[in-house]
Amino acid sequence: MDPPAWDTLRHRFDTAGRWMAVATAFSLVVSTALCTVTMVLFLAFWIASGHYREKLSQIQARPLALCSLALLTMLVIGVLYSVAPLPQALNTLRSYRELLYLPLLLTAFDDQKWQRRGYYAFLIAMLLILTLSYAKFLGWLPLGPPGQEYTVFKGRIAHSLLMAYTIYLGAQHFVQEPRRRWLWGLLIALGLVNLLFMISGRTGYLVFFALTILFMYQHWHWRGLLLSGLLVVGVAMFAYQTSDPFQKRMGQMMSDLLTQGQPGTLTAGGLRLEFYANTLSLIARHPWLGGGTGSFTPEYTRLVQEKNLYPTNNPHNEFLLITTQIGLVGLALLLLLGYRQWRLSYALRPEFIAAAQGLVVTLAVGSLFNSLLLDFTEGHFYACLTGIYYGSFNRK
């Protein structure tokens, strides 16, 4: 094939790969299988499009890409000394593949045009979820299982977390676009009712409150920070008095904390605290490098047998899960990734600064109660939106 024809083909592969990245921003909300397909196609087109030297230069120029690859490299090294069987260690490593996707997605969204396409693909997918959730509420679609009647495509944890973040994005647009405030105000109102009155996801509630505080601080600084406390308390009290899902889930959390430690009691909140305490004991056995990638399940299984504990394959805390696998070194790399992401957000395009900071807060708060990087939807959500927001960073 002559050079001009080959260059044209590579350009088409490059364009197709970017469209697959945009499709991933949509599909991560809608379907795990579809998201897997779009990401595989994205990788295939990324490889086929060539220009590896230029792409490598782009990745090297992005601090977030280097931080993500450093954490992934530590997880790869962790496979070599893991106490887990090799297939289990590799399967766990595969669950952190979004740390590889992140640098590649940064190169796909290196242009403002593609950034906006990816961003609005995500918003359109969330609008679709919101519409279908209300269709269930109105009886136009069959309800989901008990406790998740109005969730669509995803479980209540992922649904509530994504909805809380979408409400935050809507609030930013409400402030920034005076001519379209009616549109964004409608999205905020429908999202709030969906989150607080239809979905029983405590992770989403807590993320929403954290993002509310962040939003108030971003626009009104310290005065907003003080007012945000009153706003959060007011919304929480109103929701507790008027929303059955909110009252049930938050009331259960408070009840679990109050009854924790009493003989004969076994509650969801109490189990979480037990998981945290036991995971800390595992970390204490090998604090610096951990037990290796994938080591949590076999180590915790042995602890369960020794002390007759309740079994789990996940401590429901990403910070603890990373630390027990690759030690304090891994935790430092994870915290460095979040810190650099926050600091670099101030150098982004103005329309993405607040969105990028909200993404950091969403992952930080959500990871206190779930292993979000390990989970498919939340992990791809983080990698894809990071790629969108920070894609054109080095062009400023």
Image: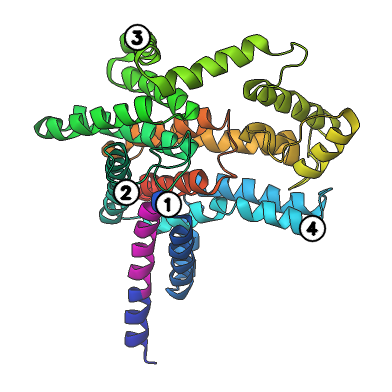
Q: Which residue is mark 2?
A: 125
Please tell me which of labels 3 and 4 falls first in the chain. 4
Q: Give amino acid for label 1.
A: Leu
Question: How far apart are labels 1 and 4 at the CA level?
Answer: 29 Å
Q: Is residue 261 visible?
A: yes
Q: Position of residue 104 (x, y in %)?
A: 47, 58
Q: Give amino acid for label 2.
A: Ala
Residue 87 in the image: above or below residue 317:
below
Q: Position of residue 168 (x, y in %)?
A: 32, 30
Q: Position of residue 23 (x, y in %)?
A: 36, 59
Number of numbered callouts drawn = 4
Q: Position of residue 295 (x, y in %)?
A: 78, 44
Crowd tier of the residue under label 1, counting other residues whose Cα lies within 10 Å: few below 14, some 14–19, many 20 or above = many
Q: Are marks 4 and 2 in contact (CB under 8 Å)?
A: no
Crowd tier of the residue under label 4, counting other residues whose Cα lies within 10 Å: few below 14, some 14–19, many 20 or above = some
Question: How far apart are labels 3 and 2 at the CA level?
Answer: 30 Å
Give the foreground label among 3 and 4.
3
Q: Which residue is mark 3?
A: 234
- Residue 25 among magenta residues: yes
Q: Could you say which quadrant of the image residue 210 lies in?
A: top left
Q: Which residue is mark 1?
A: 28
Which range of residues does the magenta coloring cover? 13-28
Give the foreground label among 4 and 2.
2
Assign a secondary structure to mark 1.
Answer: helix
Q: Are marks 2 and 1 in contact (CB under 8 Å)?
A: yes
Question: Which residue sits furthest right?
Answer: 306
Q: Which mark is residue 86?
A: 4
